[in-house]
Each structure stands twice: as structure tokens, then as C-alpha cells.
Amino acid sequence: MGNATRPTRPIRQLPSRQYGRTKIFGTIVVLLLIAGMAGLGYYFKHREPAAQAGGFGAGAGGPPGAPGGGGGRRGATTVGTTVAESTDMPVILEALGTVTPAATVTVRPQVSGVITEVRFREGQLVNKGEVLAVIDRRPFQMSLMQAQAQQQRDQAELENAKLTLERYRMLQTQDSIAQQDVDTQAATVKQLEGTVASDRAAVGTAQLDLDYSEIRSPIAGRTGLRVIDAGNYIAAGDTNGIVVVTQISPTDVEFTVPQDRVSEIIEPVSKGQALAITALDRTRTHTLSSGVFSTLDNQVNIDTGTVRAKARFENKDGALFPSQFVNVRLTLRLIDNAVTLPVSAVRNGADGDFVWLLKDDQTATMRKVTRGQATNDRVQVTDGVKVGEVVITEGGDRLQEGGHVILPADAAKAPAAGAADATNADGQKKREHRRRKDGAPGDKPAAPGTP
């Protein structure tokens, strides 16, 4: 019985399994080789027609005028063009500026007391002289009444002293009183006059304190965040005050000017010309406000080689916010009838600046130019290009001297013609297929034995 089970041991079946796996693996390899050979055969079979079809676009047998076609246009480049124009070009100085309020005031009380009213809202626009807060007025009213009463009493004594002096002088004319008594009474009158004058000043001071109990805005502007509420005691001249008021309109913008361009500003300003300036946002796409140049500082910063400058803006809509960073454009002068081109048309090479000109035979030629002033999108050409000449703006990096070019309008026609030819060929194939399917004469094979 023990020997009957020995042939079923796994160790005797292992070589058979390895042989089966090897056979399957070899079959897969053969199938992959067959598939690869079939793919290569399909590739080489369709390679020649595809190359012939692509030769049209490469210039081999292409139609004249098409990109890369015949007719002397082999290797032509599609380019964009523009015409040199004569325009009035502004000379602009650009800089980064900071909005600086024309006035910023911390409103502090001038008398001490308890605040009974707060009459402003945070961020509110207030006028000059508008009441912002009120301090308890009653103590100041009492002081005023007391000063007025003291003034009335002293005024009455003065009037009585004056009447006495007049009687003494009358008695003196009758030789009924000594001169010393008259002089003494005259001195008393002057003393009382001084007392009344002092009382008048005390009344004015009391009235002023009463007026100061209403805390008013010294300028027109926008209020900030308030630092005290009603019911709090505040001392005269408190450091924090009750609120900060910042003038919004008009406002100033401070910026720096390179020292080499200071003369360009001083010359027109000294002649009384107003230089226009524009404030733009961070991206330089949106104009925030327009203003006028104000002044230059009186010295150059030796660390940066620049001079501080200031411009005034009306800012009626509040677009300029205090301490905001803006881009400024200062117009220094205007160049009349300047020959200008787009910035992309002027290129720089080993020999300097140059442009590609388009000739009448649609070939490109290089010409050296001299740059002048420039703006964000256009540049002045002082020498090398005349008004009306056609200059290449796009595709110039692929050009060579005397090379043929294609304008975008001409390039759009070539694909349209190729599409029409493809449509005609496709229609011809369909008609041929339909004719064979219908069994047209001549398509059926001839009968055996017939000539």
C-alpha cells in the first residue's frame, strides 16, 4: 500500500509543470514577433503615400504662393506687419509713489472733562468745524457766569469812581478841595479800569473754555477709528485724542525722480508750465486719478541718487487712499510728428538696433535704426525708418536677408485651397465606388473565350 502512493508525490510532477510554462512563454514570444512583423509591414506599406501627401506642404510640388510651395516661395515665413506712423509722442517719466495726505490731525480736547456726546461715526467724512464730541458744559457755564458777575461789580465801582473824580475836579475849580485828593481819586479810577479789563479777559477765557467743550474737526476729511466713548473722562491735550482725521481731497503723492532727469522737470516748471501727472493702480491698467506736479525736494539722496517729488491730486472720488502705493506717470513734454513703431518691431542685435522691412516683392530686408523715446507699447525711431514704410512685427526671429514672407491674409487662403482639393478627391472616390457597386459596363469580368 505504501508503494501505491509513491507515484503521486509532487516532486515527480514538477518537471512536467515547468515544461508547460516554458511552452506557453515561447508561444507568447512567437505571437509578439508575428505582431511586430505585421506592424512593420503596415508601416512601410503606407509610408510612401503619406510622404507624398506631406510633400505638398514641405515645398515639393506645392502650389505657388502656398507656404513652402513652388514659384520661388520655398521656405517662406508667415509674419505680422505694421506701418510706421507719425504721431505726437509724449515723453513720460514713470515712478512708484505713495499717497500722502495733505493734512492728518489727531483731534485732542483743549479742556478737561467728561465726554457726554460722540457725534461722529468711524470712517465718516466730516467738514471743517464740525462738532465731533461734547464735554460736559455745565462747569464751564458756571465759570462764565461767575466771571461775568465779577466784571459787572467792578464795572459799577469804576463808574462810581469816575463820578467822584468829576465832583473832585469841580470842587478844585472852586478851591474847595486839595489837589492831592483829586490825584488820589484819578488813580483809583485807573486802577478800577484795569480791574474791569482783567474781568473782561476772564469772561473771554470762560467763554473760550465753554466753546472748547465742543470738540470740532480742524480740517475736512475722513475720520478713523475712535479711541474713546461717551462717559469717559478726558484731559486737555490727551495724547491719544478722540479720533484721527485725514484729509482726502485734495491729496498728495510722493515719489522719487532720478537725478539725471531733474533738469527735464525744472526747465518747464521754471517757465510756469503745469506738468500733468497720472496715478495708476498696481497693474498699470486702471487710472485712479489725474493731477498736477507740485514741487521737488531741495537735495539729492546720496544713497539712492534720487530726488523726492510731490504732486497734488483733487481725488474727489476718494480713489487714492492714504499710504497707498501707486504708479505715477509724469508727462514732461510732447514730441511733435515723431515716427513711431510698436515695441515688438524694433529688435537688438550684435550691431545695435534694427528692424525688418517688407519690400514690394514680399521679401524681408534688415535695416539699422536709432531709438528715441519710448512708451509702454510704442517706440520712437529717430533714424532708419520713414513714415509709411511697412515693418515686420511678428515672426522676425525666423527671417533671413532677402527671405520670402507670407502675410496672414495670404496664409489663410492656402489651407482653404487645400481643403477644396481634398473635398474634390473625396467626392471622386465616392463616385468611383458607387459606379463599381452598381455594376457599370466594363467592370464585370469578360466571359471565357471572348476576345
Image (tube, rainbow, N blue to C red):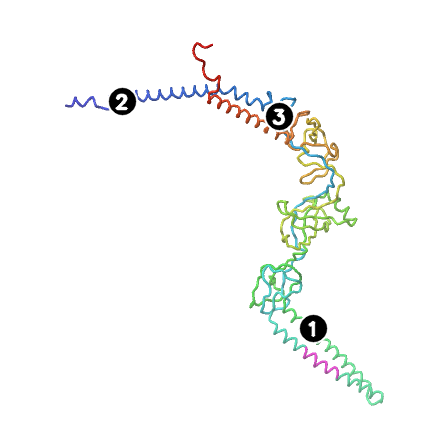
Q: Are marks 1 and 3 in contact (CB under 8 Å)?
A: no
Marks 2 and 3 in Cβ contact (< 8 Å): no
User: Which dot, 1 or 2, sits closer to the camera?
Assistant: 2
Q: As shown in the figure, which amino acid type bears the numbered disc 1?
A: Gly
Question: What amino acid type is highlighted by mark number 3?
Answer: Ala
Tell me which numbered mark, 1 or 2, is placed earlier along the sequence: 2
Quadrant (top left/top right/bottom left/bottom right) for the N terminus: top left
How much space separates mark 2 and mark 3, taking CA atoms? 71 Å
Quadrant of residue 66 in the image?
top right
User: Nearest the camera: 396 or 94?
Assistant: 396
Q: Mark 2 or mark 3: name the one nearer the start of the chain.
A: 2
Span of residues in magenta: 148-159
Please determine whether, in this image, residue 155 is positioned above or below residue 243.
below
- Circle 2 is placed at which residue position? 14
Q: Position of residue 316 (x, y in %)?
A: 66, 55
Towards the viewer: 252 or 360:
360
Query: Residue 287's x, y, as percent?
Result: 65, 48
Q: Is residue 152 magenta?
A: yes
Question: Are there few (<14), some (14-19), or many (20+) residues within 10 Å of tag 2?
Answer: few
Which of the labelled discs sits on residue 66, or is there none? Answer: 3
Label 2 SS: helix
List x then y, in percent, for residue 6. Answer: 19, 22
Q: Residue at x 63, y 75 (%)?
A: 141
Residue 183 belongs to the span the image colors magenta: no
As drawn, 70 above or below 120: above
What is the secondary structure assignment of the residue under circle 1?
helix
Picture quadrant where residue 152 is located: bottom right
Marks counted in the figure total 3
Residue under the point 65% across and 50% down:
288
User: What label does residue 204 carry, if any?
Assistant: 1
